[in-house]
């Protein structure tokens, strides 16, 4: 097998992937589009998570409870803010890498390796944001009796629904980065063989 150039895949296409490779390239573009959509939606849904409810406040046992408005908002939790920022960064990168993947047109080389490495960084960023948001969401859903934290999702149902939906969307985006890693590994391996 002869090499036709620096980016050649030994098939005479001067670095462009063949039929099987073009299928991988189309899959890569679809996964990148899904990453853009899911990370954008996750950031928007979490950023929009806000609910105000009237909570009874008992000042003394002899007096009736006073209704007090309490607001649950994603910006009140540093874990949720981190989640929003992580998804916004991943969305921005997904848009840039989608452009890079289109411009690269399935060729494998230094740009493909750079995209692969940054994809892995985005995967780690998304999983860390998901873990932070899911941990706080779990405390909101179940409380923590050991430290006296009450659950809040029985009061703030809309807010907790937004949190759950955004974490699920972000997990879908993160899983798409796993699939992108597999595609990159297969494509980069084909270059070497």
Image: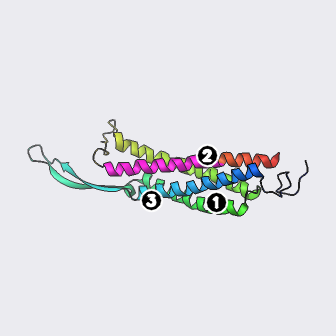
Cα–Cα gap, marks 1 and 3:
21 Å
- Residue 83 versus residue 18: which sits nearer the camera? 18
Which tag, 2 or 3, sits closer to the chain's start?
A: 3
**Is 169 left or right of 151, judged from the image as shown?**
right
Which residue of the protein is positioned furthest toward the top in this rendering? 146
Asked whether 163 falls inside the magenta stretch, the response is yes
Which element type, helix, strand or loop, lies under badge 1? helix
Residue 44 can be seen, yes or no: yes
Point out the residue furthest to the front here: 19
Question: Residue at left 27%, top 47%?
Answer: 155
Q: Position of residue 191 (x, y in %)?
A: 80, 49
Q: Residue at x 51, y 47 (%)?
A: 171
Left/right placement of residue 82 relative to residue 1 reads: left
Identified at 77% across, 56% down, the residue is 109
Question: N-terminal of the two: label 1 or label 3?
Answer: 3
**Neighbourhood count class around disc 3 (C-alpha, 10 Å): few under 14, some 14–19, many 20 upward:** some
The residue pinned by badge 2 equals 178
What is the magenta range?
Answer: 156-180
**Residue annotated with mark 1:** 97
Circle 2 sits in a helix, a strand or a loop, which is it? helix
Across and down, in percent, residue 79 comes to 44, 51
Mark 2: few/some/many CA within 10 Å (<14, 14-19, 20+)? some
């Amino acid at each position: 097998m002869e090499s036709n150039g620096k980016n050649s895949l030994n098939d005479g296409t001067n670095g462009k992937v063949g039929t099987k490779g073009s299928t991988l390239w189309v899959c890569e573009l679809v996964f990148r589009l899904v990453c853009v959509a899911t990370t954008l939606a996750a950031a928007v849904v979490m950023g929009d998570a806000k609910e105000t409810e009237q909570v009874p406040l008992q000042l003394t046992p002899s007096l009736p409870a006073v209704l007090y408005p309490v607001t649950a908002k994603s910006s009140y939790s540093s874990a949720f803010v981190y989640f929003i920022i992580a998804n916004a960064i991943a969305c921005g990168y997904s848009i840039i890498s989608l452009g890079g993947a289109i411009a690269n047109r399935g060729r494998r080389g230094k740009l493909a390796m750079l995209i692969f490495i940054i994809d892995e960084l985005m995967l780690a960023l998304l999983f860390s944001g998901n873990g932070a948001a899911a941990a706080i969401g779990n405390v909101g859903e179940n409380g923590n009796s050991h430290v006296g934290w009450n659950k809040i999702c029985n009061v703030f149902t809309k807010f907790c629904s937004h949190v759950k939906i955004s974490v699920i969307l972000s997990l879908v985006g993160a899983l798409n980065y796993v699939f992108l890693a597999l595609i990159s590994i297969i494509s980069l391996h084909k270059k070497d063989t």
